[in-house]
Image: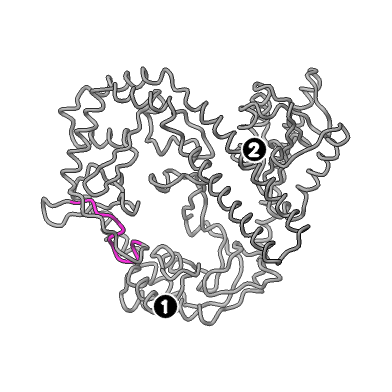
C-alpha cells in the first residue's frame, strides 16, 4: 500500500516562513519511525492556498492519484490542513475512503469507532469556526486601521506615486514620482481641454514612447479610464470603492480556462470610506470635468447602437489570430463580422494587422442556422460524436490544459538537464555538484511522469459517456418544433444556448456546439455551467 503525504499553508508568507517544511519534517519523521521511506512523487503540497476551497492543484493531484489506485494511504498533520470547511472535509474523507484510501491524522489517529468519528466531525466544525473567526477579526482590524488613517487600502501605489519600501501601507510614506506625475497631469489636461478620447490618448502616449504602468509600450483605454476615475489624484484616498462578485462569463472561448477570478464592480460614492490625504496631482475641478466627459462619452458609445440585428453577436472568433470578432455595418445591407486584430494597435494589441477577411454576416448567419437545424433534426450526429468521445476523441478542457502544462514542464526540465550536463563538461561545476543536481532533476522528472500517468488514468474515466446519447436525442426532439417559423428572438435564444463559439478561418467555418444532457443544462448558457471556471457553485451539466 503506497503512502502519500499532504501538506498545506494558507498564505505565501507562511510558505516563505517554512511552516510547510515543518509539516513535512513531522510527517517524514513519523514515517521513518514506522520504517517507511517517502519519495518526492508521493508528496502533495499546496503553498499559499486557503483551506476554505477545494480548488487546489496539490489536492487535485492527490485525488486523481487515489482514484487511479496509486495511493492507498494518506498522511496529514491535522484535519484543517485537508479542509477548513466541515462539509468539504466530510466530502473529501468519504471520497478517499470510497476509493479504498485510508486517511490518517498525525495529531490524533482516527479509527472507525463512533466516538472517533464524532470527534473528527467536531474538529472539522471547530476548524471552520476558527477560520471564520480569524477572517472576521482581520476584516474588523483592517477596517479600524483604515478609519484611523494609518493603513492604505492598496498595496500597489497608483501610477504617479511611490510607497515607502519599509512601510508600504503607511500613508505618511507616499511620495510623488515627478516623471509619472507629469504624465498624469498631461493625461487629464489633454482629455479635458483638447477633447481627446481614451483611444487617442493611448495613441498619443505610445507615440511619445511612454510605457504603461505595467511597463508595456501599449496603453489600454481601460488603464486610462482607471486613472481618470481615481480620486486619489486629488489628494484624498478612499477605501471601499470596489466590491467583488463571482465571474459571470468566460474570458475567452478559444483559450484555456485558467484559474477563476472574481470581477470588481464600483460602489456608490456615498459608501466610500475616506482614509488619508496624500500629495495631490490635479484639482477637484479637473477630476469632476474628466468624470463628466467620461459619462457623456459612454452615453454616445458605439456599443450601445442596436439598430442592426446580428444572430451571432459575440460568438464569432477569428481562426487566424484567435481574437474575437465585432459586428460592423459598412452600408445598409452590407453587414460583416470583423476580427478585432484588424483594428489599430491600441484596439488589437498587435503590432501587425490580422490577415483575416471580413466575414459576411448574413451568409454566416444563414449557414450556422441551417447547420443548427440540421443537427437538431438529425440527433444521430450527436450520438456519433459521443461515440468518438467514448473512444478518446474528446477530453475536458481543464484536463487538456493540465496535460499540456505537464508536457511543457517535462520539456523545460529536459532543457535544464542538458544545460547542466554542458556546464559539467565545460568544467563549470565539479562532479559531486553535478551528480547532486542531476539526482534532483531526475526525481522531479519522475514526479512529472507519475502525474502524466495519473492524468491518463483520469482521462479513461472521463470517457464513460454511455447513456448521454438518449438524453441528447430527447432534447433534440423537443427543440424541433417551430424551427422553420422561428423569429429572430427565438433563433438568438437557441444560438446562445447551443453554440459555444464559431471560429472562421478563411472559407472554413468551425461551429462548436454544446448540447444539454440534462434539464438543468437547458437553463443557462454553456459558459455559465463550467465547473472548472466557477469556484463558488458547481452547476450540473
Magenta-span inclusion, residue 340? yes
Question: How far from the left and from the top, in percent, is residue 463?
Answer: 47, 26
Question: How far from the left and from the top, in percent, is residue 456?
Answer: 54, 33
Secondary element type, mark 2: helix
User: Left of 133 or right of it: where is 369?
Assistant: left
User: Quick check: can you spot residue 250?
Assistant: yes
Q: How crowded is mark 2: few (under 14 residues within 10 Å), some or many (20 or more)?
A: some
Q: Which residue is drawn at 78% across and 43% down?
A: 24
For residue 56, above or below residue 419: above
Return the residue found at the far right.
33
What is the span of residues highlighted in magenta in the rendered image?
336-348
Residue 59 numbered mark, or none: 2
Question: How far from the left and from the top, in percent, is residue 373?
Answer: 22, 29
Magenta-span inclusion, residue 85? no
Q: Earlier in the sequence, mark 1 or mark 2?
A: 2
Residue that badge 1 annotates:
209
Return the residue found at the far front.
425
Amino acid at each position: 500500500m503506497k503512502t502519500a503525504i499532504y501538506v498545506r499553508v494558507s498564505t505565501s508568507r507562511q510558505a516563505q516562513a517554512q511552516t510547510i517544511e515543518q509539516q513535512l519534517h513531522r510527517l517524514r519523521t513519523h514515517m521513518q519511525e514506522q520504517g517507511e521511506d517517502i519519495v518526492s512523487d508521493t508528496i502533495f503540497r499546496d503553498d499559499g492556498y486557503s483551506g476554505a476551497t477545494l480548488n487546489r492543484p496539490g489536492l487535485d493531484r492527490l485525488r486523481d492519484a487515489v482514484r487511479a489506485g496509486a495511493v492507498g494511504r494518506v498522511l496529514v498533520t491535522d484535519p484543517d490542513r485537508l479542509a477548513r470547511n466541515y462539509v468539504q472535509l466530510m466530502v473529501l474523507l468519504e471520497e478517499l475512503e470510497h476509493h479504498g484510501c485510508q486517511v490518517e491524522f498525525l495529531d490524533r489517529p482516527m479509527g472507525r469507532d463512533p466516538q472517533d468519528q464524532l470527534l473528527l466531525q467536531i474538529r472539522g466544525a471547530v476548524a471552520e469556526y476558527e477560520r471564520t473567526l480569524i477572517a472576521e477579526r482581520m476584516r474588523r482590524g483592517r477596517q479600524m486601521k483604515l478609519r484611523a488613517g494609518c493603513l492604505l487600502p492598496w498595496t500597489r501605489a497608483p501610477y504617479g506615486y511611490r510607497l515607502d519600501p519599509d512601510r508600504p501601507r503607511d500613508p505618511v510614506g507616499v511620495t510623488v514620482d515627478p516623471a509619472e506625475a507629469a504624465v498624469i497631469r498631461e493625461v487629464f489636461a489633454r482629455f479635458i481641454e483638447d477633447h481627446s478620447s481614451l483611444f487617442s490618448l493611448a495613441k498619443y502616449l505610445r507615440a511619445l514612447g511612454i510605457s504603461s504602468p505595467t511597463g508595456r509600450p501599449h496603453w489600454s483605454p481601460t488603464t486610462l479610464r482607471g486613472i481618470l476615475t481615481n480620486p486619489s489624484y486629488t489628494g484624498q484616498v478612499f477605501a471601499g470603492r470596489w466590491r467583488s462578485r463571482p465571474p459571470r462569463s468566460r474570458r475567452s472561448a478559444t483559450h484555456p480556462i485558467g484559474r477563476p477570478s472574481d470581477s470588481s464592480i464600483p460602489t456608490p460614492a456615498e459608501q466610500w470610506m475616506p482614509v488619508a490625504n496624500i500629495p495631490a496631482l490635479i484639482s477637484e475641478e479637473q477630476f469632476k470635468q474628466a468624470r463628466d466627459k467620461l459619462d457623456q462619452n459612454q452615453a454616445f458609445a458605439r456599443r450601445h447602437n442596436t439598430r442592426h440585428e446580428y444572430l451571432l453577436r459575440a460568438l464569432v472568433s477569428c481562426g487566424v489570430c484567435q481574437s474575437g470578432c465585432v459586428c460592423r455595418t459598412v452600408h445598409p445591407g452590407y453587414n460583416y463580422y470583423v476580427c478585432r486584430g484588424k483594428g489599430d494597435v491600441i484596439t488589437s494589441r498587435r503590432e501587425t494587422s490580422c490577415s483575416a477577411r471580413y466575414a459576411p454576416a448574413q451568409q454566416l448567419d444563414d449557414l450556422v442556422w441551417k447547420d443548427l437545424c440540421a443537427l437538431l433534426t438529425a440527433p444521430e450526429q450527436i450520438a456519433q460524436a459521443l461515440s468518438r468521445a467514448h473512444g478518446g476523441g474528446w477530453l475536458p478542457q481543464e484536463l487538456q490544459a493540465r496535460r499540456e502544462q505537464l508536457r511543457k514542464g517535462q520539456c523545460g526540465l529536459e532543457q535544464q538537464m542538458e544545460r547542466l550536463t554542458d556546464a559539467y563538461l565545460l568544467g563549470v561545476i565539479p562532479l559531486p555538484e553535478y551528480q547532486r543536481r542531476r539526482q534532483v532533476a531526475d526525481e522531479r522528472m519522475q514526479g512529472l511522469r507519475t502525474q502524466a500517468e495519473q492524468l491518463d488514468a483520469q482521462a479513461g474515466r472521463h470517457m464513460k459517456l454511455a447513456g448521454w446519447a438518449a438524453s441528447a436525442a430527447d432534447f433534440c426532439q423537443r427543440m424541433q418544433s417551430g424551427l422553420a417559423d422561428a423569429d429572430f428572438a427565438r433563433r438568438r435564444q437557441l444560438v446562445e444556448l447551443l453554440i459555444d463559439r464559431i471560429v472562421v478561418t478563411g472559407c472554413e467555418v468551425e461551429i462548436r456546439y454544446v448540447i444539454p444532457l440534462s434539464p438543468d443544462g437547458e437553463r443557462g448558457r454553456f459558459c455559465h455551467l463550467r465547473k472548472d471556471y466557477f469556484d463558488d457553485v458547481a452547476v450540473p451539466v
